[in-house]
Image (cartoon, rainbow, N blue to C red):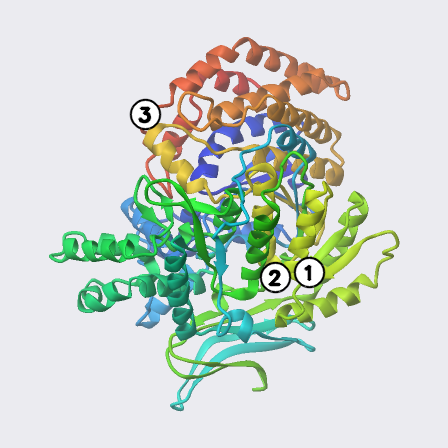
Amino acid sequence: MSNNSTIIYTYTDEAPMLATHSLLPIIQKYASTAGINVESRDISLAGRILANFPEYLTEEQKTADALAELGELATKPEANIIKLPNISASVPQLEEAIAELQKHGYAVPNYPAEPKTEEETAINKKYAKVLGSAVNPVLREGNSDRRAPKAVKNYAKANPHRMGVWTADSKTSVAHMNNGDFYGTENSTTVENECKYRIVFYGNDGSSKVLKDFAPLKAGEVIDSSVMNIAALKSFVKEAIKEAKEKNVLLSAHLKATMMKVSDPIIFGAIVETYFADVFEKYAATFKELDINPNFGLATLFEKIAGHAQEAEIKADIEKTIENGPRIAMVNSDKGITNFHVSSDVIVDASMAALVRGGGKMWNKEGKEEDTVCIIPDRTYAGFYDAIVEEMKQNGAIDPTTFGTVPNVGLMAQKAEEYGSHDKTFQISGEGTVKIEDENGTTLLEQNVQNGDIFRMCQTKDAPIQDWVKLAVNRARLSNTPAIFWLDKGRAHDAQIIKKVEKYLQNYDLTGLDIRIMDVKDAMLETLKRGREGKDTISVSGNVLRDYLTDMFPILELGTSAKMLSIVPLMNGGGLFETGAGGSAPKHIQQFLEEGYLRWDSLGEFLALQASLEHLSQTQNNPKAQVLADALDEANAKFLATDKSPARKVGGIDNRGSHFYLAMYWAEALANQTADAELAATFAPIAQSMQENEAKINEELIGAQGKPQDIGGYYQPDSAKTYAAMRASATLNAIVDSL
């Protein structure tokens, strides 16, 4: 089989990993009828760890570096990759995955958070490649084109999801800093000539330390630096606590620890430590002895005090602090998990979108909804959320039956950064200056810092910006939709980007197109205004805002962000097809392990596969692939129309039942099409067998629910056990395998 007719389907983590065990065998069999090979590559967290530490493994245990392989493939024209959501690992998740691999007999080293030896420093650097957004920047050799497919949008209009009620007297608000944050301190420049840079800390005591050694910069790159002042942050958090208490509402934190994996756990820790200041002060000696770090939240604190002589006393004081208020918003009221338990549970794009959909409310410990003061410390994007909260108070919730759609063109190619990048983010231990210097010792950017401050640098290459502008113009023209660049002229980074956008827009004939550059808050208000009038608007944004927007609007429009079509047209001609958001994946796998029910909705995978087959047909001149794609499009529409997405609890069809219906509808569409007689003949008996055995297959699939599942691991499950759990219908398996 030639590479040209190969689709790479990524093996990832949690719920998408489980779904793959059920769906991939179906896809492989169907694709094979068009001469297409569908191969899997393991880019899961466990797989990434093993690939980085071959020297610690036996010959049998060694794993190929699938991520590096796919990163290289992404630069080639024949690339066709379907990417499922993966864990963007926080430090606690990394440590859990390491412990599980060790338990499975892999001698990988422990993670040295604060390396003390050269060996530990080398291990820490290797693990840095695994943490945070380690996958996406490698694969995204192109910019993002995300939109709600027509069939999905029409279904949502006809079957609107529940929206919470917004009222003018809502006490919900966004609390943010007014000084000392990344936004306020950001400076930026465009690099004129290719050079190398390094990041150095110069202490006021005459010491110096290289934070990041020389790395390349291309001509035309935009670079930024900014600082979060830790003292200003804690002072702001005190004020937010006071505000929530005075208003008698919940208090919550909203961060992005999964993407900003160095900065945001520190910010989270500062919030936790400030809220529980009395507790951290009273038990300072105990916490030091137990190595308790507020950055890991209450969950790790409770683990570490378990069995300690002062456990009951500490817990009582924590309860007392919460009782004296303000009350903390809950992530899971039933299990007592607060918003301060784990930094990766308070992902801003998912949690704030859910709050906006829910009428500005979050859950209290009784499981009831209440207004909330939302802590989003940094102003870089706090204004975006503040604008939508205030707009909703004024105009009420949106109506999903009439609201327009907001596709997004996002700048992300070649690791485009604009707000936290983990290998250039540092917590500073001393007073002084951090400088970004070139190889001649010239200072490109610098920042004054104090002990405990967070310094970060970001960079965005020029070629991706040009491609981004081109994609925005093309999308605006093809869809006949206005496009707004969300760029804040008051922000140092955006000011540089605006200059480039204005320059590159001149390369195009914009006659008849409505293309604007607007401040983030204004862009939000204009987009909402147009949406309420039933009009569509393309949002064109930088990388982080791309992430936030493509949760916010799909969750408002469709009820979920998992139903987005996410295409990355790779700059060298290949295609990367992403399959929806993975934010709820952990809850789904937990439910599956506890009660054998998988709620994960694979519509994202179905949509991505359709786009992938279409791309393959166009680039490899494979007409059968187009027939498969058209039939799948038809199947997706029927899947939505007949509501075969997973129900919410045991007894209804789950993810596996969804896959069966998709397979049946796809087979029916292929049997009924007239473009390819061979495919029609192949699939007619398949469709018939599935129709005749529908009741039996459902019985087998639903019969497998309702009991705990042993798949042999969370991060590295046992393949045979997982296939057995996810391919629970012998009847369906026999029909699929007969192809």
Q: Nearer the viewer, residue 43 or 608?
A: 608
Q: What residue sits 53% from the left and 27% below the top?
A: 645
- Choose top left, top right, bottom left or bottom right for residue 729: top left
Q: Identify which amino acid the numbered label 1 is placed on.
A: Pro
Q: Identify the amino acid type marked 3.
A: Lys
Q: Residues within 10 Å of mark 3 (few under 14, many from 20)?
A: some
Mark 1 and mark 2 in contact? Answer it, CB < 8 Å.
yes
The residues bearing labels 3 and 1 have C-alpha atoms spaced at a distance of 49 Å
Q: Which mark is residue 707?
A: 3
10 Å neighbourhood of mark 2: few (<14), some, or many (≥20)?
many
**Measured along the vertical axis of the image, is residue 504 above or below residue 734?**
below
Outermost residue to the top: 692
State which tag comes first along the sequence, 3 or 1.
1
The residue beneath circle 1 is: 464
Using a 10 Å C-alpha cutoff, classify the residue at mark 1 as few (fewer than 14 neighbours), some (14 to 19) or many (20 or more). many
Q: Quick check: 327 above or below 676?
A: below
Q: Secondary structure at mark 1?
A: helix
